[in-house]
Image (tube, grey):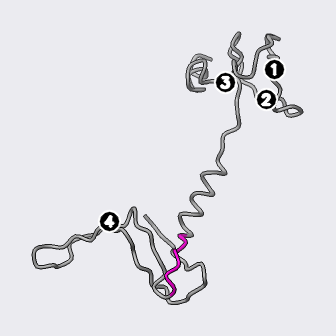
Amino acid sequence: MSRDLRCPHGCTGGRFEALNAPLYVDSRACYLEHDDSLATFVCAECAAVAIDLAEAAETIRREAEVEPQVLVCPQCGTQMLPPLDDELAPYVECPTCETRFAVEEGMPHLHRGELESWEDEG
């Protein structure tokens, strides 16, 4: 896991203390390994909780990859997007078979769970 720790107060020392990170040693107290996967890091100069810019960037990237909501006609299986002019419309009409259905009925998880299962049959 790549990290890019920064002090939120702008300290330039670049030293951070890992809290709650197990450090394993042998019977002579010599270092063996450590696990910093769940550690909280604090600035060694001002003790402020460090910001991990790499983790923040990854979180932003994941949140930006939101899939658009896709509806599936319960009658014919046509996939469609909700209407742009009224995304909160309670009912939609299938452009293929003209069946009118509630948006909840068109949610893929109510049909087969995954959109790919519809694509496999088509």
Q: Mark 2 highlights which residue?
A: 82
Q: CA distance from mark 3 to mark 1?
A: 12 Å
Task: Name the side, left or right, on which 37 lies relative to 117.
Answer: left
Q: Name the secondary structure under disc 4.
A: loop
- Label pair 1/2, CB-CB below 8 angstroms: yes
- Label pair 3/2, CB-CB below 8 angstroms: no
Q: Earlier in the sequence, mark 2 or mark 4?
A: 4
Q: Name the secondary structure under disc 1.
A: strand
Q: Quadrant of the N terminus?
A: bottom left
Q: Name the secondary structure under disc 2.
A: loop
Q: Mark 4 highlights which residue?
A: 35
Q: Which mark is residue 4?
A: none
Q: Quadrant of residue 8?
A: bottom right
Q: Which residues are magenta?
A: 46-52
Q: CA distance from mark 1 to mark 2?
A: 8 Å
Q: Earlier in the sequence, mark 1 or mark 2?
A: 2
Q: Residue at x 89, y 33 (%)?
A: 85
Q: Mark 3 highlights which residue?
A: 107
Residue closest to the far front: 47
Q: Is residue 55 above or below residue 77?
A: below
Residue 119 among those drawn in magenta: no
Label 2: few (<14), some (14–19) or many (≥20) C-alpha neighbours in 10 Å: some
Q: Which mark is residue 92?
A: 1
Label 3: few (<14), some (14–19) or many (≥20) C-alpha neighbours in 10 Å: some
Asked whether 122 or 117 is in front, the reply is 117
- Label pair 3/4, CB-CB below 8 angstroms: no
Mark nearer the viewer, 2 or 4: 4
Q: Residue at x 56, y 87 (%)?
A: 11
Q: CA distance from mark 2 to mark 4?
A: 46 Å
For badge 3, the amino acid type reads Met
